[in-house]
Every structure is written in structure tokens, then in C-alpha cells.
Amino acid sequence: MSVQVLVLTGYGLNCDHETAYAFELAGAKAGRIHINSLIDESIDLKDFQIMVFVGGFSWGDDHGAGVIQAVRLKTNIGDKILEFIENGNLVLGICNGFQALVNLGLLPGFDHDYKSRSVALTFNDCGNFRNQWVNLTINPASPCIFTKGLDQIELPVRHGEGKFYSDEATIKRLDKNSQIVVQYAMPDGGLAEQKFPFNPNGSVYDIAGICDPTGRVFGLMPHPEAFNHWTNHPDWARRKERLKRSEMPIDSGPKIGIRMFQNAVEFIRER
Amino acid sequence: MPYRLEITLKNELFDAEGEGVRQKAKNYFGIEIDQIRTIQVITMDAELLSDQLKTIQTEIFTNPVTQVSSFDPLPIEFDWSIWVGYRPGVRDNPGSTAVEAIEDILGIEFGPNEAVYTSKRYCLKGKDLTAENADKIAGELLANDIIQQWKIFTKEDWDPDVGIGLIIPKVILNHNPTVTTIPVADDSTLERVSNERNLALNPNDIPTIRAYFLNKNVQAARALAGLSDPTDIELEYISQARSDHCNHNTFRGLFHFSDLETGQREEIDNLFKTCIETPTLKLKKKKPWVVSVLWDNAGVGRFDENHHYVITGETHNSPSNMEAYGGALTGIVGIYRDPMGTGKGSKLIMGSYGYCVGQRDYSGDFMPHLHPRRLLDGVIEGVRDGGNKSGIPTTFGQVFFHPGYMGKCLVFVTAVGLMPSMIKGKPAEKKKILSGDLIIMCGGRVGKDGIHGVTAASETFSEHTPAGHVQIGDPYTQKKMHDFLLEVRDEGLIRYITDNGGGGLSSSVGETARVSNGCEVQLEKVPLKYEGLDQWEIWISESQERMTLAVSPEHLDRFFELSKKHAVESTVIGKYTDSGKLHITYDDKTCAYIDLDFLTSGFPQWEFEAEWQSPAGRGLFEPVLIEPQKYENLLTDLLSRPNICSKEWIIRQYDHEVQGTSVIKPLIGANRDVNSDAAVIRPVLNSKKGLAFAQALLPTYSKIDAFHMTSCTIDEAVRRLIAVGANLEQIGGVDNFCWPNIQYHAVNNPDGKFKAAQLVRSCRALRDICMTYEIPLLSGKDSMYVDGYLMGRYGESHKISALETLQFSATSVIDDIERCVTMDCKEPGDLVYILGKTLNELGGSEYYENFGHVGLNVPQVRPAQFLTLYRALSSAIENELPASVHGIYRGGLGVHLAMVAMGGNLGMKVDLNLVPADHVDQNDVILFSESAGRFIVTINPKEKETFEKIFNGLPYAYIGTISEKSDLVINGIDNRTIISIPVQDLKAAWKKPFGELI
């Protein structure tokens, strides 16, 4: 049986093509499905095992990034999404998708409460949209399905509202539950400790992504799907030259960004 | 009744927006403010119950983690509070999405008179703030009076219960749509009406227009349709179709060219035909990859067996000059509609920008509507929101500062799309319309937007007058439409598609009706933003985010099913016919009935006097300069010049990686902070094939000769592509001319004849270079009136004309992206080569400009010679020999050696006496001459022999090595070290001017 991935589209979402491609590289079958096709029931969420909230500017990011997307989904198919999660499936939110997940309340999902908003992604401290690659360190203790076996990764961020924010108690709880999955880091792997541009948005505790207590719902600001080929990496030409000199084979094919998608697909296959 | 909700960030949260305004107030005006807090204001003009209001407040507009809100004014402390909202009729994007969200969550539908308006209130704290300063911050930083209104409150006059009050910027026209008949008794009457109504009819066209309406046969046919003299809608249609913007009358004009020195005179009939169309058609015959050029909204080239790429570029100068953010946003979103309307439609895969503005720190006497700094901020943000929110990577861009752009700035926008080569077994680039096909308008609604462009700016405002002449683009609505159109295209439902840009329906329906040879439009079916538009206004309104399609009636149901799925509004507004007539009715009454072939026949050609005088003949000369002694200071100063220095802050605001296709990013190198020569993307994700893109503009050379400006600009764009490894045989070009007015007038445009001659010479250079380099011009546009009037210190006004400017965009394919090269040096010990010859060509250079000189010896392109070298370099890259390749562009060898070193964060040692040069005996000439046709290449020493063999017989030299040490060391002609400076110092100088900006 092939793993079926639902990649949301419509209303200003825009990373659907490459996200679907990344899942295809990981061995799944990915369909780009319009939000309205779920609402009018021409597509049934039950036919899928992984649901992806992709990056983009849903509703132009007006009134808070991901807010109106969350309102529309909660109002029309909120119950179906909860049922999807309860059935042991996977949910991934990238960038605008992460923003939608926290506004839906699917994250952080403390005590099976998938409805309350207790964390937020707000305006970058630098005051502007920013596109750059970041170093990320991955929490080995986290239950997150997507990051199994990964310890560090470089990915691009591309957002204006990526500052992770919550009160101290919530952060402590996230930390205690090992729900803090990815954090902005220095090139040497140590935490960025708020240092710009390594932490590009001022996120508290350098948080770049969190999961729910089960590890099956995961949201992050950086874009793993944008690292679907080794030439996506900003240093690839430098790296290629170095490898050539040491007569090592040149990299090719999908890279580390795809690992997150592979982990998800393997989890579904093996469950 | 209306409700007003105020929302703000919780006190403990950092207000990045407020802080941004605070810093700008300090940096721009020297006004010290302690703190600014921002409040979002949502004014709902709708019938809502109190529990509904509560739901809206908590579920949509207030984030419980970060925000607080209240239907009463929020008690945020301030010394001054400034409220800023839109004027009536200005596109309020968050207002529209708010309606969508409210309707969704409450399960209600807003009535036609209900709406949501968004605005902002800023709370400023600072003891030294004066009324004058508050006014300056409101009018010159927060709001633009063309689209916005504002109110300023002091702590004392603030009523905590009333707050800002309830401000509803609703458009109320109270007008019955009326068609007016215009008498054509004589030429002068029509000319008077043309002036009164801002029709801008060319006086030479008026007799032709009159003759048509006085023709007996025409009159008889019109009488049957119920018409006599022309109606306003008909004259608006003619005026729009005959405008220079739509018809390119200048480029199709007759030029009486004379060389004042030789006395030689010649007539040049139609620059477009002779310099653009004919050469491109010749090249198309030779190059099967050229799929479709010269007729559609954009040009089409073959990408691979199954895909074509689509490219076009234009400018959005006048609107951006008035309202920088809205103008630039409308510009980028507008150009994105061109590929969407090319063939049966393409997906957008890339965009780029080019900004020409006055100096950012301008402090002279002129008082432009927007200071260059504010203008630049605005256009940057406009293109940012337009590109990012459309999900299209902005991978390349240029900025050029010059005082000549203070009269009118230039905002270039370029779009690249991708289409499958076949749709349902038929070529995707071809389209047709059959009589009986339905005319469908989809996307946004129609208001008074963009009617007669900026001429409306002189009208006085009332409280409910729509401020529609300057628009704000809506990338969200357009992105929905983009996704929708691709789905209907792939199902084979589109027969024909074009965009609604300049001229609105008049242009899109008017032009497409020629394909089937007729149309009938029922104007009352066009969905409006508000009631009360006259018929002619509906017809020519430039309201954005709209496409016009021809759809066969059999596909109608499926078309509307998908339209609903994508939440896109589509409306059948008429049908195509083969009657030969443009027939428009409103409530069954005919208001226009014109023979479609009228516009293609009989109008007089525009004529221009062009007088050329050589640069030497005009008195230009080389300055007398004895060689400098402080080369290190000179180099760092050049790196800090505005047109050379780093502009990373702009590039990082643009998403250049969305779609996951990025191969060569705009910023690269060891620290990912130096500009790449060209952008490369991999638009088909499962293929290794790439698309390279680069642009150039070198307007300074026009001070000497626009011929060489043009050839050098094209050469630079080509070299940028070659440098990354693009295929030399498949380069396509896009020419964007921006010229000051070339129509001579003894008083208003005394140098018009010279500017006309510059245009003729520029077009000839375009023709010559493109023929030799074999670059078909896939697309191009011209903007012919880059002039403005600025008031000076004494109340006098000066006409400011831009430099004659050409932006050239070039694109090509790359068979294997893994062979691409970047410009940063890679490893210590690598050998540094120069390809191409350096001549004494400092005329118009950055070096001369640094001293206030122009000079005479402008760089010249020797295309046939250069081409041999380019082929050799392409072959070296094909064989993966170079470790880095970088063109030598503005600033010359010195500046670009620094770039290569900065890119790799490594030192470099070179000898100038090894540089291939002709008639050069000074170090400054070698270092800063801007001779075209040159590259800096670094290679692994192991490849030396193979590499040099390729260049045997060509001008090249090994001039030094990359070093572990972190200094750039340059030995002069006499072998003395003239520069020895840490690369980090060079980088610091290069980043100094704008390094602090984010």
C-alpha cells in the first residue's frame, strides 16, 4: 500500500508543488488538494495518512499569519482533522502551515487538547520578512516522528512572522515534554541564544519548531521541502569544488531535507 | 451600525513595527521618540449581534497569546497619537479578507452596503515631540496623502470614550451611469473635448477619427444601432488604443535623422520594425528554440522537450513615483499577469526588479513628492509583498542611484513563467477565438481605479471621492486566480486568455475581438466594486487582478465549477462574434459600435526630428588625471559608492527560494553575502535542466553615447549568463527602454532632437549586438516620458529628465545545473586569470564619477571578437575547469577582483603588468577601466594546461593566485605593491553604506 499524503492548496498557499515533490522523493504518493475540496467533501481526509499544511501566504497573512486559514478549517472541518490525528496519522505544518497549526490549537496539544491556542508565531524582531539559511539543532529526546535520527540540519527560513512566543510556564512545559524539536543554532551547533541573524526572528529559546506530545503533529518555520536537491544548498558549488579536489564523488540526488519526509513515510509504512 | 475594534500587542511583547517607525523618524528626520506602539483598527460597517462581535473578536482578530483588544479605544499611553487610514476606494486588502473570515465563521453573508475597513493608530511617546514633528511623521513617514488620510491627537485632546471616532471610507457616488455623445463638427471641437476629458488624443489623429464618424456608410450603420456622433465610450476606446503605451507610436514613428558633423541626413521608418522585429524574426528562423515572439503578452522559448518558458518585463514608473508601495506592488503583480495570459497560460516561476531612484541621502533643494529614500523604501516593500505573497521567487535585482531619476523614478519588473509544450495534444503557445465563444472576465471587480492615470491627481478630494487613480495590488486575489487558471488550462477549457492591464477591458476585449473579428459586450454584467460608474469608466478602468478569457459555451459549467472551488469570481460579459464590429450595450442600449479594422488603418505616423553630434563634437573630453597614490583608500571608497556597495538588505526581504527551485541564489560565497553574476533555477523539479537569468543597466554611459550604453548593457547581461554556465546559443533577450521625451519643443524640450538621436543610435546598437550575439528579443516595452518637474528653493520648477536608460534582461537554458559555476574564489593556491582585453575606456566610469568627471572614452563592444572568447569560456565551464567565474562590470577590475576575493573570504595576489591590455600605461586605467568583454576566472593549478589550451590565441593571462592569507595584494605595472589590504576591510567598506539596514 502506498502512503497517501494530502498537501493543502488554495487561498494563497504556495509551497504545495515542492512539498508534494519532496514527499514523492520520499516514496509517498502526494496529492495537492484545495482546502475547498475537503470542505465540500469531494475529497475525503480519511483516504490519507499524512496531512501537510504548507508554506505560503494564506489570506495574504492578513490579521495574523495562518489565522484565517485556521478559522476556515476549524469552522468547516475541525472535527475531521481531530479524528485524523486521533487515528494515529501524521500532521506536518511548514512556515505558514506551522502558523495555522498553532492557531488551530493542534500545537502544542498538551493533554490531548488540540483546540487551545497557547503559543504564537508573531512578527520577527528584525521588523521585516527575511530569506536566509539557518543552522538548526534537533532535540534527540523529542518524540517527533519527522526528525528521528537527525541531529543537525541547515534549511532556509522565509518569513516575516516567525518569532515563536509563549509565556514562561508553557515554554517550560514544552521543554519538559521534549516538545521543542528544532532550535536555531550557530554554525558550530551550539544554540543561537537569540543572536541575529542565527536566530533570524527573535524566537524565545531559539525555538524553530515544536511537536505535540505524541510526536505525530509537527510544525516548523524553516522549509525542509526547499532542500530537495543538493544544489539548493547555498554552499553547493563550494562543496563540489572541494570534493572534486579530494577526488570524492560529487553529491547528487535528494538530500538531508528529504529525511524528514522519509521518516514520516517510513512511520506510516511500519505502523 | 458600525463597530470599531482596536487590537494591539501585549505590553511585554516587542513591537517591531513601532520600533521600525521610531528608527526611521530618527534616521530620516532626526526626531527622537522614546517609544511607538502600534494599534490595528478594524471598523466593521455591518449589522452584527453582540455575541457575533465577541466571536469575531476572540476567534479572528485577537491572538490570546500575543494580543489584547477592545471595542473601546485601547488605553495605551501616548504623548501623540496618529491615526492613518485609507481614502475611499483605495484597495483595502485586509479589509476584504476580514469580510471573508467573518462570513465564514458566522455563516453569514455581507450585504452590498456592508464592509470592513482596516486602519492603524500609532501611540508615540517622547517629551520632545512637537506638533510639527508629529505632522512630519504622519505625512512623510506613515501616510501618503494620495491614498491615505490621517488624524493627529495630543494627549490633551484625546477623548478616551470616543477615541478616533467611527471613520467609514465608503465610496458614495450618487450618480446615474450616463453615455454622452460628443460632436465632431470640426477638429477644434474634438480637440477641446479631448483636453477637457483627458482623452489625450494626438492632434494628428483627430482628422482621421472625424473622417470615420462622418463617413456616410459608417453613419448609416450606426443609425441602425441607434447611434449618431461618437459616444464618450467610443472615443475613450480609440484614445486608449491609439496611446503610445498600447500602440508604441514612438518606436513605430518616422525619424528624420541628421548627423550635424557630417551633414548626412536619413529617414528611419519604424525603429520597432527595423531594429527589433526584423532581426528577431530572422533569428527565429535560425533558432528552433524560439517558440513564439512579437505578438502575445510575453515571448516564449523552449525550455526542454515538454516545457516552454515565458518571459516579459515592463516598468511602472509614474504610479510608483506618486505612491511608491502601491505603484510597485501593482507593477509586479501586473507583470505576473502577462505570462498568465501568454499562450493558454503559464505558471509563474521567477521575478526580478530594477529600481532607478535619486540618491538615498539626497539633501538638496528639490522637493519631490516622495524623498528618494522613502520612495525606495516603498518600492522595495511593494515588490516584496507582490512577489512573496504570489509565491514566486524574486531571484535577481538591480538598484541604480542617479539624480536624473528624481523627476520620475524607474521601477522595472520582470516575470518568467513556464508552460507545458502541449495541452490536451495541442501546442500551448497557440490560441484562437471562434465566433460564439463567451467573453469571461475573472478575478477582481471594477472600480474607478487607474482611470486616466495620474491626470486624476489634480482633482480635488471630497470625503467620499474614490482616490482610485493610484492603485494597490492584491497578490492574494491574483494568486487564487493563478491557481484556478492553471487548472482550467490543464483541463483544456481555455480557448484564449489575456490580461487586463493598461486600458482594462477596452484593451483586453478590444484587442482579442480582432482575433474572431467582432464582439458583443453587455457592460451592465461587469461586476463593480460600487455603483455609479459611467459606462466609459467600466470599459477603461484599470482595476487590477483581472483576466479576460474566451471560453467555448460547452465548457461553461465546468469552468464555473472550478471558479467556485478556487473562490475566484468569474462573469460572462458577452460573446465574441465575426461581425467586424466592436459592439457594446448597456441595459440593451448600444453605446459603442465601431469597425474593428478602423484602428489598424489610416492613422498618421508620428514624426521626430533627430540630430546627432558625436561626444567629442559636443565638447566632451578626457580629464587630465595624474595617477593616484593612495590606491587602498581609493578602492575602499569606490566599494562604498552607492551604485557599487552591498544592498543585501533588499535581497533578503525577497523570498528567492520558494518553489524549491533555487540553484544559484542572489547572495553567495563563503559568507553568503556577495552578489552572484546571474540567478539559476531548476524550474522542473525532477530534471537537471536549469534556467539562467540576468539583467544589466548602465545609464551613465548615455552621457557620452547611448549606442555604447546599449551595447555594453547587452554585453554585460550576456556575460552574466556565460559566467554561471548558461548556453550561449540559446540566449533570449528582453529590452526595456526608459527614455525622456524625444519630441522636440523649442521651449519645453529644447534637447528633444538629441534625445531622439540617442534613441535611434540605441536601437541600432540593439539590432547590431543582438544580430551578432544571436539574441532574439523575446519581449520588450518602452516608457517614453521619463521626465518630471521639481520645485526648487525659490518656488521655481525645474524639468528633470532621466538618463537614457535601457534595462536588458537575458535568459538561457543550462543542460546540467550541476555544472554551474559561482563567482566566489574557492581554494588557496588557485590561479587567477583575466580573460579579455583592458583598454583605456574610463569614460562614464564609476572611477571618473567619483571625481565628478564624465570623460570621452566610453567602453565599446566588439561583438565578433568577444564571441570567440565567450565560446571558449563556455567550453571551459562545460568541461568543469574553472573553480569560479566572474564578469568584470561597473567599477572595473579593481572592484571585481575585490568581489571575487570577498566571495571566497580568501586573499589574492595579482600583478597588473600581466593583465592583457592595449595602450594602457597607468595603474588606475587597468584597475578601473570598464572595458566590456572581460572575466576573472580562478582555476585549480592542476587544470592549468587544459585551461590555457582552450584560450590559445585569445586575449587571456594568468595574473596571480588565491592565497591563504587574507589580504588582497595588487602589484602595479612597475611591480611595486600598490594595494595590500585585508579582504575583511574591503568587505566592511562595501557594506558600510547600507549594512545596518534590514
Image: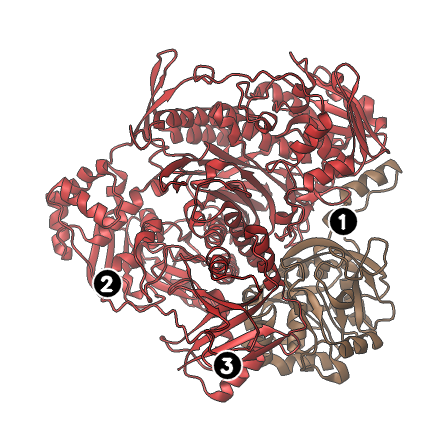
Label 3 SS: loop
Please name the amino acid that badge 2 sits on. Answer: Tyr
Residue A76 in view in this figure: no
Of all chains, the one bearing label 2 is B
Chain shaded red: B
Label drawn at residue B424: none
Asked if marks 1 and 2 fall on the same chain, the answer is no
Q: Which residue is mark 3?
A: B72
Q: In the drawing, does residue A190 fall left or right of residue B192?
A: right
Mark 2 neighbour class, 10 Å CA radius: few under 14, some 14 to 19, many 20 or more: some
**B744 w.r.t. A74: above or below:** above
Name chain A's colour: brown
The reply to whether the C-beta atoms of the residues labelled 3 and 2 are less than 8 Å apart is no
Q: Position of residue B449 (x, y in %)?
A: 36, 57
**B540 w.r.t. B589: above or below:** above
Q: Which residue is mark 2?
A: B586
